[in-house]
Image (tube, rainbow, N blue to C red):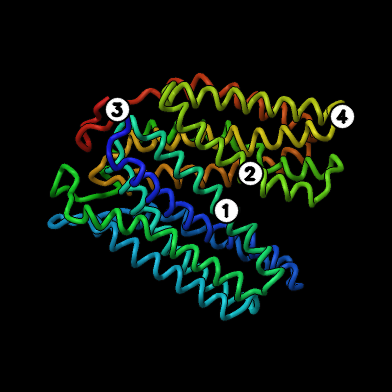
């Protein structure tokens, strides 16, 4: 039976994860399409890729953020930290709405500041979640995290475009700003009720060095590399593959929008239930096996063209929108298991940054391999890579329930 207050906690952190992903959807999905529709050249649109930097580098300031959030004396400052960062982000979005989509450089500068604020809020939210969730509840917490990311991305990258098309730029961006503000309120209300709480280990000073001393963290980083390579290497090539199969851009857009929203959220919920019922390690193995089957299907279609177009679209939905969130709910639950509650924002952030870095490198490599060897060979290699990673993932996925004292190497 769920403990009292669990669903209030899940809803509060889930709302904050949706809010953060609304900003991500605006930045990385909605805004590029709007700028291109305004006639801006592709090299200007490409500047938006710089906005990923705070998310890839946030581990560098995560110790300072955690030291402020969990001071050596005094209570938890999570609510204050989220209120400050969230308020800054809402104000930044409002300013972007007033500036307009062009000129792009002022918009880029404001959004870069918003990205730093949002990435810092994410450190606080992750740390708060690790401290608050019990071992048996991690699956539901990570379902809220991953499912919230899908919902927020759909709002920021989909709903924004509809509003901008019908009511204009300011109405679209200011609606997103209002959504971010409203979605953050449940977390602030929940976190304020435990503002005086302090995790066990009062007096500990969060640091990245303390994180890297622990064997379970180093094992977690190796697990992240293996799992992300197995799950994400081929996903960036699915869209181009569907286009080259003769599937229209509008159809691919529906797959990426409504299909991802419904199946992505469903997959996250399924991942939470499976983690609770089967355990984290088994769910990661299941997700990789299912992804390998999807990739093998793409390889067969690329080599033979025998499958109907609907089957190719179904494979895309299955792999990117359903199987992937199941796997990442389990992976992120493992991250939480390996994060020390006394500096959870540092530990969890390090794992996330490794995820982002490996994803970026895998995506860059995938493009070159697909270009030179063809889709058939590429997807076959990706499926073999996923299967080949299974023994390592199985071995690395074994972990203690929660870490012992920092530096103890408790296994």
Please name which of the two marks, 1 or 3, marks the residue nearer to the observer: 1
* CA distance separating discs 1 and 4: 32 Å
The residue shown at (32%, 33%) is 2
Residue ID for mark 3 = 401
Query: Which secondary structure, mark 1?
Result: helix
Mark 2 and mark 1: Cα distance apart in space: 9 Å
Of residues 4 and 23, the one nearer the viewer is 4
Q: Which residue is mark 1?
A: 153
Give the Cα separation between the discs numbered 1 and 3. Answer: 32 Å
Quadrant where the N terminus sits is top left
- Distance between the alpha carbons at the discs numbered 4 and 3: 47 Å
| Residue highlighted by disc 2 | 260
Q: Position of residue 134 (x, y in %)?
A: 29, 35
Which quarter of the figure is the C terminus placed in? top left
Determine contact: label 4, label 3, CB under 8 Å. no
Q: Which residue is mark 4?
A: 305
Name the residue at 29% across, 43% down.
Answer: 5
Which SS class for mark 2? Answer: helix
The reply to whether residue 199 is in sight is yes
First in residue order: circle 1 vs circle 4: 1
Q: Residue at x 41, y 70 (%)?
A: 88
| Side of 151 where 383 appears, left or right | right
Marks 1 and 4 close (CB-CB < 8 Å): no
Q: Nearer the viewer, mark 4 or mark 2?
A: 2
Q: Is residue 83 left or right of residue 170?
A: left
Q: Residues within 10 Å of mark 1 (few under 14, many from 20)?
A: many
The reply to whether discs 2 and 1 touch (Cβ–Cβ < 8 Å) is yes
Residue at horizontal 45%, vertical 44%? 145
């Amino acid at each position: 039976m769920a403990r009292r207050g669990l669903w209030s906690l899940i809803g509060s952190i889930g709302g904050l994860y949706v809010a953060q992903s609304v900003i991500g959807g605006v930045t990385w999905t909605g805004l590029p399409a709007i700028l291109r529709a305004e006639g801006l050249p592709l090299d200007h649109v490409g500047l938006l890729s710089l906005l990923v930097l705070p998310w890839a580098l946030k581990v560098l300031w995560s110790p300072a953020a955690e030291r402020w959030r969990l001071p050596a004396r005094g209570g938890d400052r999570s609510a204050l930290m989220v209120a400050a960062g969230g308020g800054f982000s809402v104000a930044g979005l409002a300013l972007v709405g007033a500036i307009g989509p062009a000129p792009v450089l002022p918009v880029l500068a404001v959004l870069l500041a918003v990205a730093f604020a949002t990435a810092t809020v994410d450190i606080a939210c992750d740390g708060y979640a690790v401290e608050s969730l019990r071992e048996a509840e991690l699956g539901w917490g990570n379902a809220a995290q991953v499912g919230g990311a899908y919902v927020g991305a759909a709002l920021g990258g989909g709903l924004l475009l509809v509003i901008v098309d019908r009511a204009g730029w300011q109405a679209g961006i200011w609606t997103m700003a209002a959504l971010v503000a409203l979605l953050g309120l449940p977390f602030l209300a929940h976190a304020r009720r435990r503002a005086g709480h302090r995790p066990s280990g009062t007096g500990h000073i969060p640091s990245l060095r303390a994180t890297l001393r622990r064997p379970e963290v180093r094992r977690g980083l190796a697990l992240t590399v293996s799992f992300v390579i197995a799950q994400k290497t081929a996903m960036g090539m699915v869209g181009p593959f569907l286009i080259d199969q003769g599937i229209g851009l509008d159809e691919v857009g529906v797959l990426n929008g409504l299909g991802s929203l419904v199946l992505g959220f469903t997959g996250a919920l399924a991942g939470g239930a499976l983690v609770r019922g089967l355990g984290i390690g088994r769910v990661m193995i299941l997700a990789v096996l299912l992804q390998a089957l999807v990739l093998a299907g793409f390889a067969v279609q690329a080599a033979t063209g025998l499958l109907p177009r609907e089957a190719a679209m179904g494979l895309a939905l299955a792999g990117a929108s359903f199987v992937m969130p199941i796997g990442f709910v389990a992976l992120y639950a493992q991250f939480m298991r390996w994060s020390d509650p006394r500096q959870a924002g540092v530990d969890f952030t390090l794992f996330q940054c490794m995820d982002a870095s490996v994803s970026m490198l895998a995506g860059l490599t995938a493009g070159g391999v697909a270009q030179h060897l063809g889709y058939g060979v590429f997807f076959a290699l990706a499926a073999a890579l996923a299967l080949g990673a299974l023994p390592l993932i199985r071995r690395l996925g074994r972990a203690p329930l929660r870490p012992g004292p920092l530096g103890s190497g408790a296994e």
